[in-house]
Image (spheres, grey):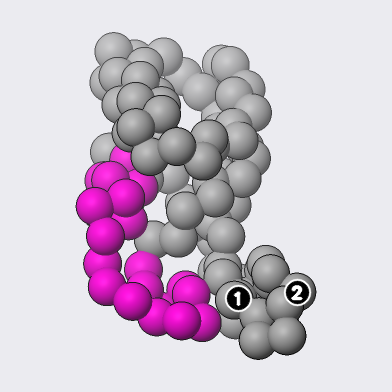
Amino acid sequence: MGLIGVCVPNDDNLRFALFDELKFCVSVGYSMVFGGRFNPVRFPYERSSGGRLSSLMLKLSDFINACGLIDPPLKGGLYTWSSHEVVPVLTRIDSLS
């Protein structure tokens, strides 16, 4: 079994490619444990500004489901990241296992 440390890039095309590559590895039978930070959010409610369900959110959810990953529940607050501005943007950045 391989341990894969993941820090998802900020470019959406690179994110999509990474998700596809990791899904492929799982689909052909590689046993892996993923750990790391998945910077995108899965759902609009995970961002203080809300918004709509985006293609990136759908792609991340598809990746999570296809690989059988667990998105652990957040305890102690709604968000894990802040922009630290006067009116901050808050998000729940996904950490998967």
Q: Quadrant of residue 76?
A: bottom right
Q: Residues within 10 Å of mark 1 (few under 14, many from 20)?
A: some
Q: Residues within 10 Å of mark 2 (few under 14, many from 20)?
A: few
Residue underneath mark 2 = 84
Residue underneath mark 1 = 90
Q: Quadrant of the N terminus?
A: top right
Q: Nearer the viewer, residue 48 or 38?
A: 48
Q: Could you tell me how far apart the alpha carbons at marks 1 and 2 are, in whole angstroms?
A: 9 Å
Q: Is residue 84 left or right of residue 17?
A: right
Q: Nearer the viewer, residue 33 or 7?
A: 7
Residue 36 percent location from the top left of the image: 64, 40
Q: Is residue 20 above or below residue 42?
A: above
Q: Nearer the viewer, residue 5 or 51?
A: 51
Label 1 is placed on what type of residue? Leu
Residue 95 percent location from the top left of the image: 59, 52
Can residue 26 be seen at all in this image of the molecule?
no
Mark 2: secondary structure: loop
Whether label 1 touches label 2, CB < 8 Å: no
Which contiguous range is marked in magenta?
Answer: 43-63
Residue 15 percent location from the top left of the image: 41, 35
Q: Quadrant of residue 35?
A: top right
Which is more N-terminal, label 2 or label 1? 2
Q: Is residue 6 above or below residue 37?
A: above
Residue at the outermost front position = 86
Mark 1: secondary structure: strand
Q: Is residue 11 left or right of residue 1?
A: left
Label 2 is placed on what type of residue? His
Q: Nearer the viewer, mark 1 or mark 2?
A: 2
Q: Residue placed at 66% from the left, 80% from the top? A: 88
Q: Quadrant of the C terminus?
A: top right
Q: Residue placed at 75% from the left, 74% from the top? A: 84
